[in-house]
Image (cartoon, rainbow, N blue to C red):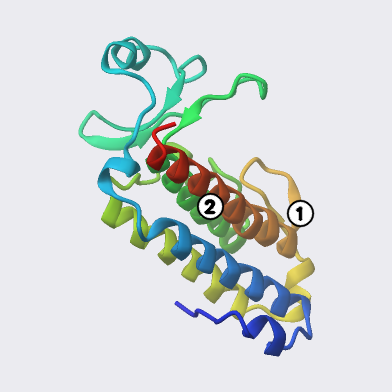
Amino acid sequence: MHLFGADDYLTRKMESAQDMLLLGIDTAVVRANETLMDISEAEYGWDPLPAAERAADDVLEARVKRVWRVYEAGGRWTYHYAPRPAEQPAFTTIAWIMNHVTLATEMFLYCLQTGKAAGDGLTWDEMDVSAGLGAMQGRVLESLGAARRYVSGLEAADLRRLTPAPWGEMRPVYLNVWGGVIEHTIQHMMQVAVRKERIRQQY
């Protein structure tokens, strides 16, 4: 994985849209490293509900759950997800956020490389969810590395080529990379940082 120091913001030349996308991905990598590399196993799976309340929450559907988690079902790992009103969000564990970021990056990359939306050859349910902090830390960076290699191989004209977002909307390559990989990752890394600090302060 390509990393860069703080002084690279001053010395790195930005001569194209591709350069900006690569800088964005590298920034997401730095933020992921800063945020995720010192997380403990306890913080990774930390849940705000006491045991009795969690048992009641476990049997609810994702659309009404208080907490979305990574969990095992039918011999494989998965995680909660369902449409719900923006004003009624679920609390998401750090494990959930890390998996969400990685699967979104991988799905956007699938759409970019194949020209297919989610559900056309690959569904969200078919994507593997990683169980365990160590595997997840590496997978976050691996997915960003794959996105970087993809962007590095593009020609200038490719950046404006229309490709589907996972939900099917046709958008330029640069917008899918920026929104689905760079911005999405950085926003969620900020969320993890807040989760981590609040856990350490015991809320």
Closer to the camera, 45 or 104? 45
Query: What residue is at 76 percent from the left and 54 percent from the top?
Result: 171
Name the element at disc 1.
strand
Tell me if residue 134 comes above or below residue 127 in the rendering: below
The secondary structure type at the circle numbered 2 is: helix
Kindly indicate the quadrant of the structure image that contains residue 24. bottom right
Location of mark 1 (residue): 171
Between the C-alphas of marks 1 and 2, the distance is 25 Å
Amino acid type at image mark 1: Arg
Whether residue 85 is visible here, answered yes or no, is yes
User: In screen coordinates, is 71 left or right of 35?
Assistant: left
Residue 121 visible in this rendered orientation of the protein? no
Q: Quadrant of the C terminus?
A: top left
**Quarter of the image where the N terminus is located:** bottom left
Q: In this view, does 51 lie to the left or right of 60?
A: left
Q: Residue 83's x, y, as percent? A: 59, 24
The disc label shown at residue 189, or none: 2
- Mark 2, residues whose alpha carbon is within 10 Å: few (<14), some, or many (≥20)? many
Amino acid type at circle 2 is: Met
Q: Which of 26 and 105 is in front in this view?
A: 26
